[in-house]
Amino acid sequence: MSTVQIRGRFDTPTFAEDDEDVVVIVGSGPGGGTLAHELCERGIRCVVLEAGPHLTAEDYVQDEWEAFNQMAWLDPRTTSGSFRLAKDFPNLPAWTVKAVGGTATHWAGATPRFKAHEFQTATRYGAIDGATLLDWPIGLEDLEPYYDRAEEKMGVTHVGGRPPLPANNNFKVMGNGAKELGYRHIATGPYATNSAPFDGRPATVQDGFNFQGDKQEAKWSPLVSELPKAVRTGNLDLRAGCHVVQITHDARGRADGVLYLDEEGGLHKQRGRAVCVAGNAIETARLLLLSDSPLFPDGLANSSGQVGRNYMRHLTASVYGRFDREVKMWRGETMAGVVADESRHDTDRGFAGGYYMQLISLGVPFLAAFVEPGGWGPDFTATMDAYSSTAGMWLVGEDMPQADNRVTLNQGMTDAHGLPVPHVHFDDHPNDVAMREHGWTQGTKLYEAVGATNVHRTPPYPSTHNLGTCRMSARPEDGVVNEWGRAHDVPNLFVSDGSQFTTGAAANPTLTIVALGIRQAEHIAAEIGRGAL
Amino acid sequence: MATTPSTPVATTLTSPASRELLKDVARAMFPHPSFPDAPYERAVGTILEAAEADVRLRAQLEQGLRDVDVVGGSPFAELDDAARLAVLRRIEGTAFFEHVRTRLVTGLYDQKPVWDLLGYEGSCPDGNGYLGRGFDDLDWLPEPQIVDPHRDEIVR
């Protein structure tokens, strides 16, 4: 793999809009960016359409609200359901990025692999009321070689001879508490931020800013790795500020391109031999639903009725422990700490599936906004007054897919382009509630084991892990795409992001999205090679 | 048909009294004994500024600040801390309360002087991070062990 660094903004060639040989990729995040790079390296020209701007390390600001307003996907969305986000952040169900590199420019870097049983939840967990569990059409053994390659691509710590990240202040608290509790699987990774220089990018300087973009470029993202590498092949045409409004198809029902709006609002049509959608689970489902037509009246690739359903967002919750002495959790890599002991499937705990405890740190502005949404008064200010003596952990675990947890089009509200906004309905499943309670309890014990004087249970933040809305299935009636991410209904339409996850597993999804992207690229290249695409 | 009065209704929001009352409300809502008035005054300033362009907010503030002075039986400024808190508890959840609370959560805590008061350093001044400058300076606990996550992995 080349280590030539291309910093800053890069220019790409422009391929003709009527060029039928290109592969059109919607979205430049970990799914779309990885797929584009892998295809470009194989000599396949790609047009990547990214709705957001081309921000670079120079543009990023180490200030929470300013960065949020610069990077976040803030187009209006609506919500309903029993999940607390519908009350706390009714128009912000998800916290994703609208920029080149996608949500991977804001991720922290945690890269656990899925476990074997997490590909077989219907079989291993059995029937759970209200849950639409389904076995993946692939298993861990199918993905392992691609996990290896994804970890090498991303410079994941603990593997490939790369050292672990050093323990920061926040980890010292979590690691010691975990040990006191009898946990054994305590580490600072695996994590896709450089612990030593790698791939032309420097080691982390522990500046503590991840969710705001990485000014040092020590963290892997498509912006600093996949996309500039794809540029060097000469096969990438990246168009920022281009919002795809519809996938179009020919008389046979094959995708033949997309309609998109440029930055000035001009409508274009880009043709292509295949269309790959990687807009993050809410926008990917929305685009398929917006691509309804007389031939596909319920939306493209939706004969199963599964597009938008089974939306998953991971358990998520946080625990903040307050101590007598200073912690200074904001110093250092935000999420470089993981306790994996609860990631097993062990129904003796009262729920199926598992969860990880991972470090988290928020600055004062975001802690105020998220530690207790709706909070005020002396209890709230006591939490804020203890800021520098506070340690934080995030709980990320598998949530149950449910048919009615879904993304639909809200016909009563349109975005700035005049398109119906996505509506997200989500009810917590009793399994999710039980797992969250368990995580809060264990996190409380962990901090109390090292002297916490107060522990705060924080509810879910707007979701950064959005999954399952176009899920993989062996049988066309159970899902939207097959084992390659190819639509059951449309032979040259692919889903290339976390939307294709059949179930969510406990692990942070980015590593698996990248592994699936490498695998899908091989498949698409082979199909093109044999004349099938 | 009646004609519109040539002068719009006078707003009391810009008066020093309104500003002072809203500051008292802000401090009662987010009481930090160690904070001087300045951060509250700045946060109130951003709310009043927002009200210039937001008629709903302005209307809510006009009425809400009058109500705050009667709910507790005496003007808000004459109440002690406990009584002020009781007033806010009574009006919690009203549109006025939520307008003020949501704007204070950002307006108060997104100030560098407040970060300093709470000990938050934010970005390292030169942007070069905390490596070698205290990212691992916590010394009241032992060095934690880091276990290779790929060995002895929990696969059950």
Image: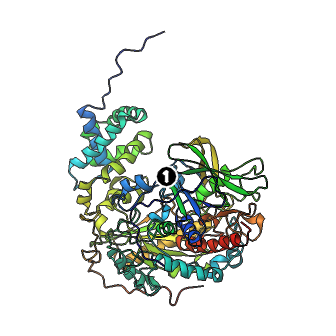
Q: Choose between A244 and B34: the one closer to the eye.
A: A244
Q: Choose between A103 and A99: the one closer to the eye.
A: A99
Q: Amino acid at mark 1?
A: Phe
Q: Quadrant of the C terminus of chain A?
A: bottom right
Q: How many numbered marks, from 0 up?
A: 1
Residue highlighted by disc 1: A89
At a point 62% along the width and 75% down the height, the residue shown is A519
**Vertically, is A375 above or below A392?**
above
Q: Choose between B30 and A512: the one closer to the eye.
A: A512
x, y percent for residue A419: 60, 44
Q: How is the image coloured?
A: rainbow
Residue furthest to the bottom: B152
x, y percent for residue A106: 44, 63
At a point 65% along the width and 76% down the height, the residue shown is A119
Q: Image quarter for residue B93?
A: top left
Q: Image quarter for residue A38?
A: bottom right
**Vertically, is A144 above or below A488?**
below
Residue B83 in view (yes/no): no
A413 relative to B43 in the view: left or right: right
Q: Image quarter for residue B52?
A: top left
Disc 1, SS = loop
Q: Choose between A524 and B3: the one closer to the eye.
A: A524
B79 relative to B156 in the view: left or right: left
x, y percent for residue A387: 31, 64
Mark 1 Cα-neighbour bin, 10 Å: few <14, some 14–19, many ≥20: some
x, y percent for residue A424: 60, 53
**Vertically, is A460 above or below A116?**
above
Residue furthest to the top: B1
Q: Chain of mark 1?
A: A
Residue A396 in view (yes/no): yes
